[in-house]
Image (tube, grey):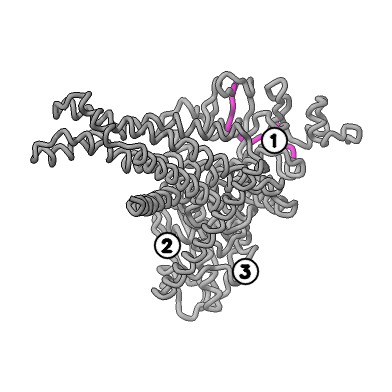
Amino acid sequence: MSTSPEKKPPSVLSVKNLEMRYGSTLIQQNLNFEISKGDIFIIMGGSGCGKSTLLKHLIGLVKPAEGAVYYGGTDFWAADEQARGKLLQDIGILYQQGALWSSQTLAENVAVPLKEYTDLNEKEIRDLCAFKLQLVGLAGFDDYYPSEISGGMRKRAALARAIALDPKFLFFDEPSAGLDPVSAKLLDDLILELRDTLGATIAVVTHELASIYAIGSNSVFLDPVSKTMIAQGNPTTLLNESKDARVIEFLTRGNTHTEG
Amino acid sequence: MVNVQPILKEKNHCILEISGNFLMAESRPTLAELSQSFPRDLKRLSFDAEKMSAWDSTLLTLLMGLQDYAKEQNIAFDISHMPEGVQRLLDLARAIPERPGTRREVQKASFNERTGKATLEIWKESIEMLSFVGETTQSFGRLLRGKARFRKSDLLIHMEACGPGSLGIITVISLLVGAILAFVGAVQLSMFGAEVFVANLVGLGMVMEMGALMTGIILAGRTGAAFAAQLGSMQVNEEIDALKTMGIPPVDNLVLPRMLALILLSPLLIIYANTLGMVGGALVGTLYLEIPLQVFFTRTFEYVTPWLMAQGMIKGCSFGLLVAFSGCLRGMQCGRSASEVGNAATRAVVTSLLLIVIADALWTFLFIMIG
């Protein structure tokens, strides 16, 4: 699973010296990491350490207090409006609660980015929406409203919307939260499959240990007390090699005595 | 640029040779165009993607279409020469087949069906409204026996929001309504040289009708809609379920403080509105009609008796109650999505206005009967 340094693919997303604040409250500082093409990059840490906030900084919802987020060679926040809009087309996001638009059917939800950014005709859009819904296992649910389906299905529908434009980057905020273990496993498999087939680079905010080991190829560990990252690397490698008690405690669910 | 070239290999075997970029942004052949070019007795369909440099989901939708077409026509479908990613995505899309009965038949209901459904809806609605009346009455009963539980600070917060919070808009509207009454009256009365009666008109108009009505309408738009939106979003967030499962009746905890706030404050707001309306009328009277201020107010108080004032107050209090009732009713009925919250707010305002006007008519009729 671990990639040796000499064969490492080029980094497509890098964070340099990032500092995050809400008003005067410091959330995290001195964040430096790189995400390589095809990585499944896990952002982990205890509750309230700023995982979701970091995700919001990566996808351009919140402006960093200091530092920069680079997509390829482009500094996201230094780029002009147009370049930023172009970058956003390459980004698909699965929000924690799905964030489907409740007044639109599943197919209409998936169609929104397609209508906005492509010249496809009605039928092509309809076919693409049906295909994306089939990919996430929701064949035939095109005309359902989000309120008519279960939470797990909503999450998958939201994933269909996130991959509508075949994005180069996929961001997941707590993908398995609120899912049963079987659904969570299926979603993990789906994430791996999408990485392999669409060639997307994926960043996942999660504290679900099973997921972290199953899909993560690289990671960063945020600490709420020191307000910075205290570890990075492949999660399995971290578990075996990290010397930091906080990291080990997290990665073993606090069973530090039985660590391997 | 993308090019899809059907090449006839053997007699019944067609190879689709794809070259270039098969991407959304390119112009691509459609399923119908391709199937036109197939020979009639086609038995096998395969692909050659050696020269294809890039692809995205649009290739998959075409392949899905071709696969369905092939199945229908009994044609062997072979995608083994496609890139591995394409094959796996196609497998993934077919992995969970559509469950029968999932798809919705979107059909237009007949006129009779729609009429019937609408009638049933009205029936259901009336029952819901009546049971809400029942629940709130019970809740008030519990309040009188000192058994209703809600936080006193909630009551104060709601009182602050709908009392002092609405003074600004009530000031502007009442002043203007008073002034408008004076102007409209002056035009007619001046024909008889009886401008001085403008004072009576403004006084009676405000106290008996406009003060209460305007306050009711402002409360409906400001406070009633807010109540519906608050309770509606609590419904969406399952906050109301949380109350229920703790054994706290949501009506006691959420509806009661809101209703009390409006019932307690609407008389005060009406007194304020009436006063400002008369000030507005007096401004027009003194500045435009040149009636001395003293004469204006003497005449006003001569005609505006305590009983007339009481009529306005009774009306106004009932409007406050109705606004709180409609706002809370629509909020509690709210569905579980964001757009439902918007609907709840709209319906709260519409219901409030409707009930206010009906109540106004009933009270007016009743007061005339009493004499």
Relative horizontal placement of residue B296, taking residue B16 as reference (left or right): left
Q: Position of residue A190 (x, y in %)?
A: 65, 52
Per the rendering, the mark at residue A123 is: 2
Instruction: Using the rendered image of the protein, determine whether residue A195 is visible from the camera's viewpoint.
Output: no
Q: Position of residue B91 (x, y in %)?
A: 63, 61
* Chain that bears disc 1: A
- Residue B150 position, x and y percent, is 63, 39
Corner quadrant of residue B316 = top left
What's the magenta region? A1-20
- Residue A132 placement: quadrant: bottom right
Q: Are marks 2 and 3 in contact (CB under 8 Å)?
A: no
Label ID, residue B99: 3
Name the spot of residue B228 as percent of width and height, x first: 50, 46
The residue lying furthest to the bottom in this view is: B41
Whether residue A260 sits left or right of residue A50 in the image: it is right
Q: Which quadrant is home to the C terminus of chain A?
A: top right
Foreground mark, 2 or 1?
A: 2
Which quadrant would residue A35 be assigned to in this image?
Answer: top right
Q: Give the spatial CA distance, label 2 vs label 3.
A: 23 Å
Q: Which residue is mark 1?
A: A218
10 Å neighbourhood of mark 2: few (<14), some, or many (≥20)?
few
Chain letter, disc 3 residue? B
Give the residue type that dot 3 points to: Arg
Tell me, yes or no, whether dots 2 and 1 are on the same chain.
yes
Q: Residue at x 59, y 53 (%)?
A: B135
Q: Are marks 2 and 3 on the same chain?
A: no
Callout 3 secondary element: loop
Disc 2: host chain: A
Residue A8 part of the magenta-drawn span: yes
Same chain shared by disc 3 and disc 1: no
Please name which of the two marks, 3 or 1, marks the residue nearer to the observer.
3
> Is residue B335 placed above or below A46 in the rendered structure?
below
